[in-house]
Amino acid sequence: MRRDHDPLLARLRALPLFAACPRPELALVLRCSTVHQSRAGEVLIEQGAAARELVVLLEGSAVVELDGRPIARLGPGDVAGEIALLDKGRRTATVVAETDVRALVSTAHELTLLLTHAPVLTRALLAASASRLRSTTAQLTASG
């Protein structure tokens, strides 16, 4: 039995977003992303800005703000920035590191490669986006 000794690969396997991905897809994720460290208080994504990257939290937490109002909290395995990359629109919310954050960052081109060559991950990303849409819709319905 082969064991993966790369701690980053092991970390990915532990996150729900990547749990079902076969090893070749995880290897592609590592090739198509860069590990980025952010300090608490740093803006990871700014509402209204042009989309340049996708962010997947590996460690730490971040707050999602809409028009300066907190609307959600992100933790390890959560993804941000995919909507604006997919539709080439502006960022729909601001994401601020609540604690020090370690994240995988992929450019628009790298995301295209992942969507094309990593079908298990593509389904997981779509499911995560759909889940977030449902949650947001429920919040809006509850608030009137």
Image (spheres, grey):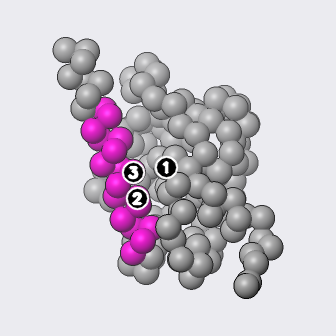
Query: The residue under label 2 is which amino acid type?
Result: Leu
Name the mark on residue 14: none
Q: Secondary structure at mark 2?
A: helix
Name the mark on residue 125: 2
Q: Position of residue 108 (x, y in %)?
A: 45, 64
Q: Nearer the viewer, residue 128 or 99?
A: 128
Q: Residues within 10 Å of mark 1 (few under 14, many from 20)?
A: many
Between disc 2 and disc 1, whose residue precedes?
1
For the question of whether residue 43 can be seen, the reply is no
Name the mark on residue 79: 1
In the rendered structure, the answer to whether residue 140 lies left or right of residue 12 reads left
Are the two marked residues, 2 and 3, in contact with CB atoms closer than 8 angstroms?
A: yes
Q: Quadrant of residue 48?
A: top left
Residue 141 on the magenta span:
no
**Residue that badge 3 annotates:** 128
Q: CA distance from mark 1 to mark 3?
A: 8 Å
Compared to residue 29, the image places residue 136 above or below, namely: above
Are the two marked residues, 2 and 1, in contact with CB atoms closer than 8 angstroms?
A: yes
Q: Which residues are magenta?
A: 119-136
Q: Quadrant of residue 141?
A: top left
Q: Secondary structure at mark 3?
A: helix
Are the two marked residues, 1 and 3, in contact with CB atoms closer than 8 angstroms?
A: yes
Residue under the image location 62 percent in, 35 percent down: 61
Residue 126 on the magenta span:
yes
Compared to residue 3, the image places residue 87 above or below, namely: above
